Image: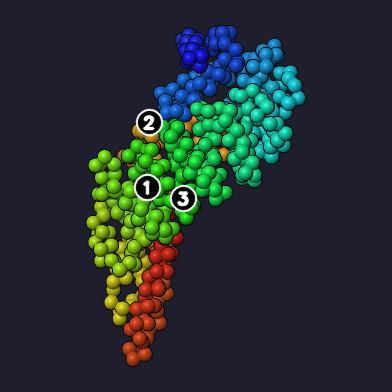
Amino acid sequence: MKRAALTSRLMGLLLLAAAYPSAGLAQDMLQPYQLVRSLQLVQDRIAAGDHAAMPMQAKLLEMTDARLRAADAEDFKDPRNFRALLVYGMSGGNPVTVEAAVSRAASDSQNLAIAKGVIDYLNGRPGAAIEALGPVDPMTLPGDLGAFLALVKGSLLATDQPAAALTLLDEAKLLSPGTLVEEAALRRSVGIAVAQGDAARFALASTQYVERYLYSPYASQFADSFVSGVITLHMSVSQDKLADITSMMDPEREKVIYLRIARRAAIDGMSDLSAFASARAEQGRDGNTNQGDPRALLYSSLSTVTSDTIEDVRAKLGKIDRSKLSDGDRALLDAAQAIAGEVVAPPASLPAVNPAPAAAAPSPEPEIAASATDAAGLPPVEGAVSEQPAVAPSPDAAVAAPSASEPAPDAATVLPASAPAAPASADTTDPTDAAMTKTRRQLDLIDQMLGAAPK
């Protein structure tokens, strides 16, 4: 109730200030800490899926920046305003504004060290930022400042000290539950857990993210890490656990996630995982199956192209509607059909394998999107927490077309041609040996084709 009352009061003041053409009224009416607190409340609503609050975030950033640029030494005698300045910086604020305001403020040595680290962080100097922030324990600071500092330190240490980074991200979640800080900490924990090979941490962080922040405008960043994690940790994360996590998604997101997993698994030769993910993508929910989706048909066929049921695979490939595939997936389809045709060719002919038809430039994997108005894309780990997301594609545009500026690869990029076999006389060639040689060559070509395909 207290938080709701504070939100209502601050929003009322902001609306009143925004109604005037000048930002001067807002500067007179609100202290920096009030504006920054309002910014945090709006960002937390956005993280929870309220995308309608995004215009208010832009307005608040503008008003807060103006207020901090106008703040003087007297304003910063209130420790809440100096903490607000630091939080603003770690929320993606203007580094020029932060540096100028710090130069006018008088504070204790620890706060000034934090300020130096934040400025280094914002200006892309991670080494200096780690040196300045290293001695500061986020758990000893006021909750709002400590949470952001833990997130920033965890992000800075993610590559060189992943175990320490995970501990700091846990502290960020503990200090600021239900906020943009927790959303970012969970999302980054997923990626670090994958790099560490920690399947238990990966599954836990993924479950918590899907439960709490599936509708965040930054959910596509999570989806990227999640799909990569499933592929990397496929021997440690069971299919049952994967199904448990995806069952918390809505049907469209679940379908797109399984399509992306199926594609990556097929390309990497993980036939069991590809078959499982393809089947789940086709299965659908609530009686709404996706059996006609050409992507699911293609991905489920790739890893079985040399199986005993090759005629069934060829028939399945022949039914795929090419017009509904991206350029990259059409290249995979062409290569798979060429390989399947060679597998069933009579051994006696043993022709040199020709490359598949030239493929267009590879396109990205299917995208996960929260809705047609979702935003996607957080900055790299080194970036600030609240950089503005960009609008993501709608679920209907699950596979984007490639950039027109990208050159189409040579056919050999998709399916390199093997050297023609040396001619052999009919009286010296064993048909069995010829068949085995051909089969080995087909398997090698499949590996080359899948390895060169876009991931």
Q: Is residue 170 above or below residue 10?
A: below
The residue located at (63%, 27%) in the rendering is: 146
Tell me, yes or no, if residue 34 can be seen here.
yes
User: Residue pushed farthest right?
Assistant: 109
**Which residue position is annotated with label 2?**
373
Please report contact status of discs 3 and 2: CB closer than 8 Å, yes or no: no
**Which residue position is annotated with label 1?**
258
Numbered disc in front, either 3 or 2:
3
Q: Is residue 219 above or below residue 449?
A: above
The residue located at (30%, 68%) in the rendering is: 308
Q: Residues within 10 Å of mark 3 (few under 14, many from 20)?
A: some
Judged left or right of residue 137, residue 210 is left
Q: Is residue 347 above or below residue 193?
A: below
The residue located at (50%, 27%) in the rendering is: 178
Res. 449 image quadrant: bottom left
Judged left or right of residue 441, residue 69 is right
Element carrying mark 1: helix
